[in-house]
Every structure is written in C-alpha cells, then in structure tokens.
C-alpha cells in the first residue's frame, strides 16, 4: 500500500510540482487548497504525513497546526516562504515535525519526509521495552537498563544528561525547540534558561561525539533548538 501524503497549499504551481515529484517516488498524493479543507482531508483520508504551507487563504497554517495537534499526531512538515526564526520556532512549538523554507530542493524535502515517516513509525515502540535497543553509529542505548555504550565502551551519564538524551531519542530526527526541551527535562519554570541546554548539549557532545567540535549526532538548529541524528531500533 502506498504512503499517503497530504499537501495543504493554495499555490497551483507548488501543488503540481510536489505532486509530480512525490508520485514519482510512489507516494499517493492528496491536495487541499485551504486550511479547513486540509483539516477535513486529514479527518477523512488519514494521511501518513502532511506538507503544510503557513500562508493559506482562509486560516493560517499555524492555526491549522494548532487545531490539528488537539487530536492528531500525524507528522507535519511546514513549507513556507517565511524565513524568520520566530515563525519556525512558533510552528515547531505548536507541533510541527520539521520546517523547510521555500524555495527548497526536492531531494532535501524527500530526505525530510523519510526522517519524519521513520520517526512516526518508531514512536509506537515503547522506550521501556526490554528488547528495544536504540543505535546511532557507534552509540547504543538501552532505556530499560539506563545504559549506553560508544563502541564497546560503556559511557556514564548524570541523571539530567540521560533524561535529555532519552527525550532526544524519542524524537530522533525531529527539530526540538529550546522551550520543548526545557519543558520536558527541567519543567515549565525553566523555559527561558537556554544556557542550561547549551551546557548539557555540550556535555553530551563531549562524552558521545567522535569529535565534539564537529557534531554528527547532536545537531544545532541555529536560533531554534536541536535535532538528534536519526536513531535506529
């Protein structure tokens, strides 16, 4: 069965471009030209991923995202000409899985789609499953035993470092904003303490990256937050 992708965008040229590119990759493509139509399509057609423009003719893409996240966890990649960091942060805080600024290359979009779909399919796997081991390159993490290894060497983390790592693993491949990470690991009263993240991400890089100055696992999204390179299970 083909993977179904819904495009919510009112630009006919973009609709046509995306349909041709995605159908060439054997995706099933649905189109909605307004926010309300998009919400209806999600309800009745059950797509596996949504490509969402922010500038829609009836309601904003942010409003669509906010309404959608009240009842659905379907992966959403925002496509928009808005390049300001505040727009990206707002979209991600509202529950978008990723953000791509127009114009974009189709190969980059396809890569983002693969990551979002993979993350969505892995979300159903419980982190406390005793048979579940997560891997990224030389790293292996056993959530039940709260242990991790780099190659054959076991690495010790503090409780906070480990909680941050587990949250990143749970959302591997997804951009997480500073506020999302602070809320999850430290609590609502620490939402403005971004220096906490800088310190602890630096600690994780020093302990787990082959070269902390050229990180390949804990990736920075400038002005927005962090992304963990995709983990395998």
Image (cartoon, rainbow, N blue to C red):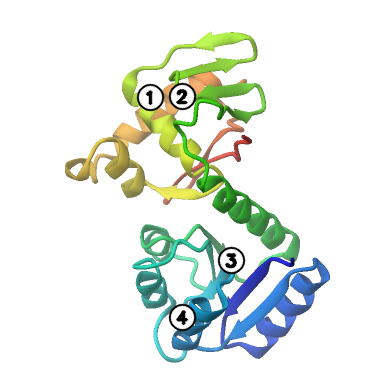
Label 3: element kind? strand
Counting other residues with Cα less than 10 Å from the Cα at mark 2, is it few (<14), some (14-19), or many (20 or more)?
some
Horizontal and vertical percent position of residue 156: 44, 12
Q: Which residue lies furthest to the top in this view?
A: 153
Counting other residues with Cα less than 10 Å from the Cα at mark 1, is it few (<14), some (14-19), or many (20 or more)?
some
Where, quadrant-wise, is the N terminus in this rendering?
A: bottom right
Write down the residue under mark 4. 39
* Residue 161: image tag: 1
Q: Do the residues labelled 1 and 2 touch (CB within 8 Å)?
A: yes
Task: Give how far apart the Cα atoms at labels 1 and 4 are.
Answer: 38 Å
With 129 as the anchor, is 231 left or right in this view? right
Horizontal and vertical percent position of residue 121: 58, 51
Label 1: element kind? helix
Task: Give how far apart the Cα atoms at labels 2 and 4 are.
Answer: 39 Å
Residue 203 visible: yes
In the image shown, does 152 or 225 lie closer to the viewer?
152
Q: For residue 183, what is the image quadrant?
A: top left
* Residue 49: image tag: 3
Task: Give how far apart the Cα atoms at labels 1 and 3 are.
Answer: 31 Å
Sequence-wise, the earlier of marks 3 and 4 is 4
Residue 103 visible: no
Sequence-wise, the earlier of marks 1 and 4 is 4
In the image shown, does 203 or 37 lie closer to the viewer?
37
Label 2: element kind? helix
Write down the residue under mark 2. 204
Label 4: element kind? helix
Q: Nearer the viewer, mark 2 or mark 4?
A: 4
Sequence-wise, the earlier of marks 2 and 4 is 4
Q: Residue furthest left?
A: 189
């Amino acid at each position: 069965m083909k993977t179904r992708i819904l495009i919510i965008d009112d630009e006919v040229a973009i609709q046509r471009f995306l349909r041709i590119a995605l159908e060439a990759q054997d995706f099933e493509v649905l189109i909605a030209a307004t926010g309300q139509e998009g919400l209806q399509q999600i309800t009745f057609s059950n797509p596996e991923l949504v490509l969402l423009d922010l500038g829609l003719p009836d309601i904003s893409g942010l409003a669509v995202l906010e309404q959608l996240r009240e009842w659905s966890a379907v992966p959403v990649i925002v496509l928009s000409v808005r390049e300001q960091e505040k727009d990206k942060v707002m979209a991600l805080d509202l529950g978008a899985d990723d953000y791509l600024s127009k114009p974009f290359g189709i190969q980059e979009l396809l890569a983002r789609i693969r990551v979002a779909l993979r993350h969505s399919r892995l979300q159903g796997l419980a982190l406390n499953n005793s048979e579940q081991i997560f891997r990224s390159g030389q790293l292996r993490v056993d959530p039940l035993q709260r242990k991790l290894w780099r190659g054959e060497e076991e690495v010790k983390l503090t409780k906070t470092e480990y909680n941050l790592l587990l949250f990143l693993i749970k959302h591997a491949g997804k951009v997480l904003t500073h506020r999302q990470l602070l809320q999850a690991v430290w609590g609502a009263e620490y939402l403005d303490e971004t220096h906490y993240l800088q310190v602890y991400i630096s600690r994780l890089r020093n302990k787990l990256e082959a070269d902390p100055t050229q990180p390949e696992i804990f990736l920075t999204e400038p002005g927005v937050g962090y992304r963990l390179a995709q983990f395998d299970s």
